[in-house]
Image (cartoon, coloured by chain):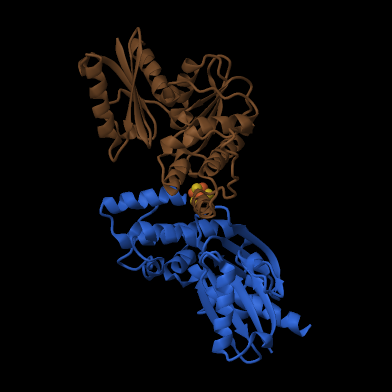
Chain colours: A brown, B blue
Amino acid sequence: MVVAGIDAGSTAVKLVLHDENRFGFWQRPSGWSPGETARELLQEALTAWGRTKEELAYICGTGYGRVNLPFLDSAVTEIACHARGAVHLRPGVRLVIDIGGQDAKGILVSSTGRVIDFVMNDKCAAGTGRFLAVMAHALGMEVADMGACIPGSVEAQPQPINAMCTVFAESEVIGLLNQGIDRRAIIAGLHQSVARRVSAMVARLGAPGPVLFTGGVARNAGVRAALEKALGCPVEVKEQSPFAGAIGAALIAREKAAG
Amino acid sequence: MVVAGIDAGSTAVKLVLHDENRFGFWQRPSGWSPGETARELLQEALTAWGRTKEELAYICGTGYGRVNLPFLDSAVTEIACHARGAVHLRPGVRLVIDIGGQDAKGILVSSTGRVIDFVMNDKCAAGTGRFLAVMAHALGMEVADMGACIPGSVEAQPQPINAMCTVFAESEVIGLLNQGIDRRAIIAGLHQSVARRVSAMVARLGAPGPVLFTGGVARNAGVRAALEKALGCPVEVKEQSPFAGAIGAALIAREKAAG
Ligand code: SF4
């Protein structure tokens, strides 16, 4: 039995195919029509696995753009899917920190994998992937390349960024560049800024056990290192961390198809 | 006796010369060095009045950039200067709403002109002139031209802007333009957004009497109309509203020079 989980985020659509033996992972930038992107991605994935749409037992969707996916069998909240996917990726996880293209979430999970509480910021671009994308543009680089600059390494003593607001921080970064401040120090400061904002947000949840970092920004090793420093505890990242929501959706799809 | 008041804002430096008989007004974009800009502006103003620097009895400064003005006799907080200037512009005023290039303030003034309480936002670009500047850029127009679009007029039924955040609202505006939504409706929606944010901020101060709108954004008739709607009361604007802080600084300078 094959099922699909789709996480239609603001920046990228993530798709997971799942059968008895394996998981498959695909992603693509959301573009102007996340619905169309998801449909194409699904076709590509099915072709790769040599399956047809008729063989798909269930499709479960989540994420910002799930309302634009008419072909879903059901849509599930992001919190439920992300928690489910995180527990699958890291059994025993207690705190999930998810930083996506335009939001950030903290999810407190019980020792049995149930959602106890969560906090979320989807109103302010600060502390989200969008903050980093705006800064990458100001720095004239790709956002994917920022992560290579890890705070604490010799070449990157963080330059503190005073402004919390994305708009004001962008001006600050331009000012720092004009002053000739090392670009790597600025990047490290930006990672610190994201980590501070997110760690302040999740503070009330506590971190009673393993912390897993998920979402697209989990690919950024600099933010991870800054989060560890801000939280004062290890922050784990799995290779499939950006797919946590889609994995959760696929697992829920399998349950629904079975039940 | 001639005195000067300087309001070194993030966007523009405003200068007021004041003698027994009159006030004179000058302003210039702050540029990279507000201190240098203020010095040039002061020279220009003195020349226009046929005075020398030696004849200046006192220079009082305020605003974001006041720390960069080494030639001041004293620096005074923005709240004190804005309140003082507002009471001068509109005797009897009880609530001053000041929206500048990158902050917004509400000041509650007693019937005798003393500051009772104030609220301020200088952390988030939403609800400030910066929000409008970012949107003007997205709309491909000058921020000074946005004000001509007054909500409530037939051609400008506001298109609601859902995102409060400047960064997310910018994306929303670009999306609305791509959908072919009338630019004037978008502008009216943006004015509404600023007015809602600022009116929510000043709500706890109340408006026990006349309301005066000051700061650079007071030139925008659309924001003024939207503020009147959001507050449910008249909002006055004076020709010299953008100079309120500098007028206050000049009046304080005269007192200090005299006392
Ligand atoms: S602080 Fe900046 S990034 Fe955050 S909501 Fe305000 S404008 Fe947006």
A89 or A220: nearer the eye? Answer: A220
Residue B99 spot, x, y in % from top left:
53, 65
The answer to whether residue B76 is left or right of residue A44 is right
Q: Residue A101, can we see it?
A: no
Residue B10 spot, x, y in % from top left:
54, 64
The answer to whether residue A130 is left or right of residue B124 is left
The answer to whether residue B232 is left or right of residue A39 is right
Q: Quadrant of the N terminus of chain A?
A: top left
B118 or B255: nearer the eye? Answer: B255
Residue B33 spot, x, y in % from top left:
55, 66
A226 or A179: nearer the eye? Answer: A179
Q: Is residue B4 above or below residue A51?
A: below
Q: Quadrant of the C terminus of chain A?
A: top left
Q: Residue B224, can we see it?
A: yes
Q: Quadrant of residue B96?
A: bottom right
Residue A169 spot, x, y in % from top left:
52, 50
Q: Residue at x 76, y 85 (%)?
A: B258
Q: Residue at x 50, y 74 (%)?
A: B28
Q: Quadrant of residue A81?
A: top left
Q: Residue at x 24, y 17 (%)?
A: A48
Q: Is residue A133 above or below residue B92?
A: above
Q: Is residue B64 above or below residue B85?
A: above
The answer to whether residue B180 is left or right of residue A211 is left
Q: How many numbered markers are drawn?
A: 0
A250 or A58: nearer the eye? Answer: A250
Q: Residue furthest top?
A: A21
Q: Residue at x 24, y 23 (%)?
A: A44
